[in-house]
Amino acid sequence: MNNKQSLLASLEQSRERVLELLNSLDAQQAKVPYLPGINPPIWEVGHAAFFFERFILQNLDKTPSYNPALDDIWDSFELAHEDRWQEGLFPDKPDTLRYFDDTFNKVKQRIETKALTDSDLYLYKYAIFHLNMHIESMVWARQSLGYAPPPYASNNTGAENTRSIDHNDVEVPAGRYRIGMPPESAHYATEDFCFDNEKPGFVVEMEAFKISKNLVSNAQYLAFIQSGGYEEDQHWSMAGLKWRDSHGARHPLFWKKENGIWLERHFDQWLPVQAELPVKHVSYWEAQAYCKFAGRRLPSEFEWEVAALGNREQGEFNKFPWGNTMETHRVDMDSTHMARLPVSALPEGDSPFGCRQMIGTVWEWTDSLFFPYNGFTMDMYPFMSTLQFGDHKVVRGGSCATSSILIRGTYRQAYTPDRNDVFVGFRTCAQ
């Protein structure tokens, strides 16, 4: 995405995905009920247009606002989350789509007609990547609400081509490894775009550790449930117990048991829980309790990144387990398989140490709190990272609902430890 042609293609593909997600909902579905983890889809579309308008058109060209009266409505830091459900607060779908189209056409025209400087390219990428974050949130909203899967998702709802699952660990040797994006990357890096929380990169001295080759599967997690893992307090931390008891949690969020059979809701379908699929929609507290039950632990975010990329201090730096270019056939991303492949699938995406599905499938909980790296400086969007520092846990790798243009092995996402509505799972380390 470093020339006009690729930039325009990414812009158009992202626009099409947003429109598919919105237009595949009927009028009643678009009026979503209030839930803390989602947004009204029409507001999401208006907010995405506002971001392009504010950070590209107004920032670069001093273009007047499309409608100044609505600027605070579309600004996520001016309008409180719960207020986004007020009847009549923002325009209806046709008016919002006119704003969306007008903004995108202006941005497209600007890319086509103006010189593409490094600083402009950085802003274009930032806005496109921000839009793709909202594409993911629109996808997990459909899961939360029991709507149909994204119209461009695969129809595969079963675990085909199942391989035998290797539940053994891989060993990562001790050494000096690089974490984050290289500090020599320019602020307006065109080849190595990253967000502020990935910078500046540094070197860590790592002790040897063992980490599971595969994500924790449904079969492994079922063993925890069936052994009384949710009822036995010794598996849970004090904060975990408080969360478990306040939510009445006894299984992953979208599971239920009927006639002795465990079922999992996959968007608008209830399907039998399949043993070889990755467990997902579990909170940090549940992942932590499972680890205590299994005599394991969660990796730190540095251990996760080293296991995924293996970037040694003196070696070549790679952004992905296989190199420096995203290759989508290696991953479950872009709402293709929706985490319906076995944990043993996609060996072509293995890390240098043999860890599987570290990019895509599910976000992976780590045991690390989200803090800035030493030397952190804020990017153009001051709220990208700063509001999450200190009380969020780091998750890594992206998910099946994440856009593949967004993710690198250095990418850091942060969720509060109670979040289980997103496509999140985990893998474990030996004690």
Image (tube, grey):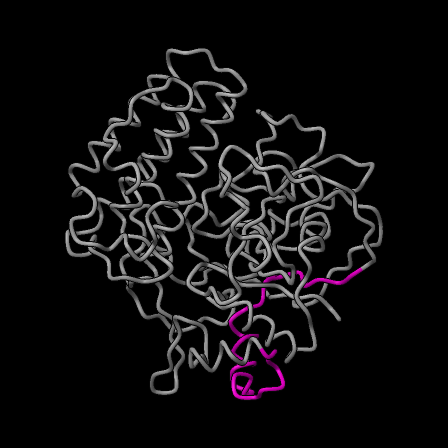
Residue at 43%, 39% (x, y): give it: 130
> Seen in the image, is 186 located left or right of residue 338?
right
Q: Is residue 353 above or below residue 65?
A: below
Q: Is residue 212 magenta?
A: yes
Q: Could you tell me residue 345's position as x and y percent?
A: 55, 56
> Seen in the image, is 275 located left or right of residue 372?
left
Q: Quadrant of the C terminus?
A: bottom right
Where residue 167 sits, quadrant-wise, is: bottom right
Residue at 46%, 52% (x, y): give it: 400
Residue at 49%, 50% (x, y): give it: 332
Residue at 63%, 86% (x, y): give it: 234
Q: Nearer the viewer, residue 169 or 61?
A: 61
Q: Is residue 280 above or below residue 31?
A: below
Q: Could you tell me residue 398's position as x and y percent?
A: 52, 50
Q: Nearer the viewer, residue 378 or 101?
A: 378
- The mark total stands at 0
Q: Which residues are magenta?
A: 209-238
Q: Is residue 170 magenta?
A: no
Q: Could you tell me residue 41's position as x and y percent?
A: 27, 49
Q: Could you tell me residue 256's position as x and y percent?
A: 37, 78
> Seen in the image, is 340 located left or right of residue 49?
right
Q: Nearer the viewer, residue 353 or 29?
A: 29
